[in-house]
Amino acid sequence: MSASTENFLKTIYCFQKLEARDTKPGSIAKALGISNAAATDMARKLSEKDLLEYRKYQALQLTPKGERLALQVIRKHRLWETFLYRTFDMSLLEIHNEAELLEHATSDRMSEILWNYLEKPSFDPHGDPIPNVYGFVDFEKDSKVLFKAEEGQEYRIIRLVSNDEEFYNFCCDNKIEIDNEIKVAKQYSKNQLTEISILGRQIVIPKEFSNNIYVTRISDQ
Amino acid sequence: MSASTENFLKTIYCFQKLEARDTKPGSIAKALGISNAAATDMARKLSEKDLLEYRKYQALQLTPKGERLALQVIRKHRLWETFLYRTFDMSLLEIHNEAELLEHATSDRMSEILWNYLEKPSFDPHGDPIPNVYGFVDFEKDSKVLFKAEEGQEYRIIRLVSNDEEFYNFCCDNKIEIDNEIKVAKQYSKNQLTEISILGRQIVIPKEFSNNIYVTRISDQ
DNA sequence: TAAAAGATTTAAGCATACTTAAATATTAAT
DNA sequence: ATTAATATTTAAGTATGCTTAAATCTTTTA
Ligand SMILES: [Mn+2]
Ligand SMILES: [Mn+2]
Ligand SMILES: [Mn+2]
Ligand SMILES: [Mn+2]
């Protein structure tokens, strides 16, 4: 498996399962920074290898084999993130960037060593679940994006997902951290702004950021 | 720089500087497990990029630029080895194999993080010196291969270098470890055997192994 | 529903990194 | 000094992973 193939499968998996984005070659191409032609080409090759289903003009779909592979790469990615975050003084963005490289240079043995050393972690530092060695994702908490949270309700932050340095800086500056509790004061729907109170402070968050912050209702039951 | 290129330069450097082996394309090819034709091809391409000097039928020679690059890769390799050895329960062979992959997926930033975390180490767990960030190798101890050590003299083990699992098992079983002291009892030159005493025990070491054990004279001055 | 806009696919081509087989040069042996 | 053995290079070809430009299909809009 080349890094290109692994990134391709991983991206399809994330688009398919974790976000509700479409998985036509064009979307994958944009995410990976390659041309549409290259993505189509890759899709046909991987379908030969039974890693995904490709039908002209349709969205790409991972086969069970392709999904297993994608989950192995995601596992390695999140294990490295967890390890780097706990061991060194690195930011949420730095660990992601390094893991993006390391995930392709990690033997199965190495990932088991990390897994055991970290004492079988369930979540990475961004709040994303770590698949187990069989590619099974234990459980996904019932969450929604802050952008879609209800006014007046209290939530706990459980995921922060982005590749944008400014997003993480914003979070840092405003104490938007995993496990912190917030209250949604107001949704300015037309202007796509969310006003919340966090640790006593009131802040307004634009859609670009509130879409990367996942929350879960507190005492929802 | 692709992994292929990095491994190619690294191998030339090691053959040139650390061992007295020749650096014609054929030797490099054998070490990397590729065909002679592929090595020649690679040599011509890298010479275009001013990473090495290539003249038909001659040994390859790194340019200053090529040597700097090789040393950066070696630095990353040995930093990872040191880190893995100190952090996890991994053998001298395991750390080498993992570092062989990780070295190509390591940003300069990551290698500086490792370097600082490890408190600027000078040697890796095999006893090999770690180049600094400018590609400068601090100092190489005055050493020789056990195979060429003098009868009756006492030595300290300072390097163990091999890719052979059996070699490391042999070392483990016989307490042949870095910093341990030995006395060379006899060199059976014709049969290429070396008899040493180590921690009170007398053992005979065949050339295949004694050539991978580097020693330095004790109180040599 | 027909044209325009937008995506996707096909086609042609390039760079890297390899292969095997044939040609050529070097080195060792007689 | 030839010849034989060995090593190196050249040639031809393959797979991967990308590119741009042209052709084709799908979706939107009028
Ligand atoms: Mn990646
Ligand atoms: Mn993550
Ligand atoms: Mn390597
Ligand atoms: Mn080493």
Image (cartoon, coloured by chain):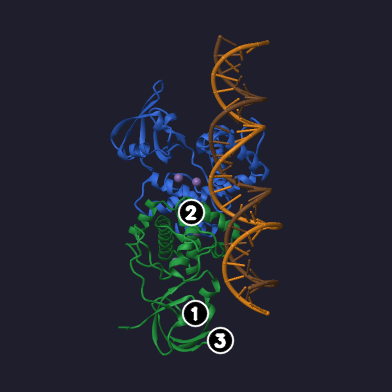
Chain colours: A green, B blue, C brown, D orange
The crowding category of the residue bearing disc 1, from other C-alpha atoms within 10 Å (few below 14, some 14 to 19, many at least 20), is many
Residue identifier under label 3: A191
* Quadrant assignment for ligand 4: top left
Disc 3 and disc 2 in contact, CB within 8 angstroms: no
The crowding category of the residue bearing disc 2, from other C-alpha atoms within 10 Å (few below 14, some 14 to 19, many at least 20), is some
Out of A63 and B25, give the one closest to the viewer.
A63
Badge 2 amino acid: Ser
Badge 1 amino acid: Ser
Name which residue lies at 36% across and 46% down.
Answer: B91
The crowding category of the residue bearing disc 3, from other C-alpha atoms within 10 Å (few below 14, some 14 to 19, many at least 20), is few
Q: Secondary structure at mark 1?
A: helix
Give the answer, above or below, for where A175 lies relative to A100. below
In this picture, residue B195 sits left or right of residue A105: left
Q: Secondary structure at mark 3?
A: loop
Q: Which mark is residue A47?
A: 2
Q: Chain of mark 1?
A: A
Badge 3 amino acid: Asn
Disc nearer the start of the sequence (3/1): 3
Percent position of residue A6, x then y: 48, 56
Q: Are marks 2 and 1 on the same chain?
A: yes
Q: Are marks 3 and 2 on the same chain?
A: yes
Disc nearer the start of the sequence (3/2): 2
Give the answer, above or below, for where A120 lies relative to A127. above
Name which residue lies at 43% across and 37% down.
Answer: B214
In this picture, residue B174 sits left or right of residue B28: left
